Image (spheres, helix red, strand yellow):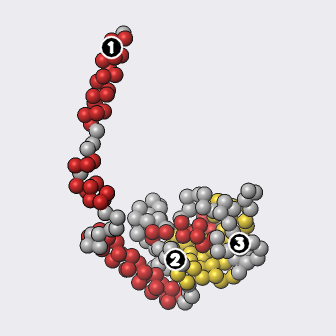
């Protein structure tokens, strides 16, 4: 029994050692390790820059079309405060409840609190889109805002798996209905 265990142990060690990938010989791995900066001639980088540029143009067209006076944040989120609200601004780990409408840039509504119910989530600690977390931290209870969330701050290339396909910017109108403050 003891010799069988010993033989199985040796076989496992040999298998893991033999299957170990030698990344030092992988040219892509070596190139990534040696590069501190992305290659400006990288076709994937160029393709991504082109798509982000197109998305920016679509967002600009949408905001002009609907007369939204949005400001661009450092992350690329477009934000316009419609109503200030009162009290302290929303902070990380607060639980917020929102009335909302989410549209595609075509104007088609995909989600709405009128149909789908209010949205409640913990700020910076839930799986809501990053653009929504960023926006609510600019708001107070009773505040209302327009947002245009670029795809990389929304559902990215995958989409949400239901109504929003990948690489889609979203237009949102949100209102902070309630804030449950973090006790820490």
Within 10 Å of disc 3 (Cα), the crowding (few <14, some 14-19, many 20+) is some
Q: Position of residue 182 (x, y in %)?
A: 72, 59
Q: Which mark is residue 156?
A: none
- SS for dot 2: loop
Q: Looking at the picture, does residue 57 appear above or below residue 10?
A: below
Determine the residue positioned at 74% across, 62% down.
Answer: 181
Residue at the spot of label 3: 89
Q: CA distance from mark 1 to mark 2?
A: 62 Å
- SS for dot 1: helix
Residue at the spot of label 2: 74
- Quadrant in which residue 151 is drawn: bottom left
Is 48 on the left or on the right of 102, as rendered? left
Residue at the spot of label 1: 4
**Labels 3 and 2: the sequence-earlier one:** 2
Work out which quarter of the rendered image holds the C terminus and state it. bottom right
Q: CA distance from mark 1 to mark 3?
A: 66 Å
Q: Position of residue 131 (x, y in %)?
A: 54, 70
- SS for dot 3: loop
Q: Looking at the picture, does residue 108 appear above or below residue 23?
A: below
Determine the residue positioned at 29% across, 60% down.
Answer: 34
Q: Are marks 1 and 2 in contact (CB under 8 Å)?
A: no
Q: Looking at the picture, does residue 95 appear above or below residue 82?
A: above
Within 10 Å of disc 2 (Cα), the crowding (few <14, some 14-19, many 20+) is few
Q: Are marks 1 and 3 in contact (CB under 8 Å)?
A: no
Q: Position of residue 153 (x, y in %)?
A: 49, 69
Work out which quarter of the rendered image holds the N terminus and state it. top left
- Mark nearest the camera among 3 and 2 is 2
């Amino acid at each position: 029994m003891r010799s069988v265990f010993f033989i199985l142990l040796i076989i496992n060690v040999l298998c893991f050692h033999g299957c170990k990938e030698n990344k030092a010989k992988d040219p892509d791995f070596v190139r990534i390790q040696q590069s501190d900066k992305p290659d400006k001639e990288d076709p994937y980088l160029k393709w991504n820059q082109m798509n982000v540029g197109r998305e920016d143009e679509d967002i600009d067209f949408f905001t002009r079309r609907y007369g939204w006076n949005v400001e661009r944040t450092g992350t690329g989120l477009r934000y316009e405060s419609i109503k200030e609200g009162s009290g302290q601004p929303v902070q990380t780990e607060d639980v917020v409840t929102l009335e909302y409408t989410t549209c595609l840039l075509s104007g088609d509504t995909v989600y709405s609190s009128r149909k789908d119910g209010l949205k409640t989530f913990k700020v910076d600690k839930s799986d809501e889109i990053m653009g929504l977390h960023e926006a609510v931290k600019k708001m107070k209870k009773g505040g209302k805002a327009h947002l245009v969330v670029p795809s990389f701050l929304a559902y990215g290339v995958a989409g949400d798996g239901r109504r929003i396909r990948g690489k889609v910017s979203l237009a949102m109108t949100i209102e902070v209905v309630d804030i449950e403050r973090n006790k820490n």
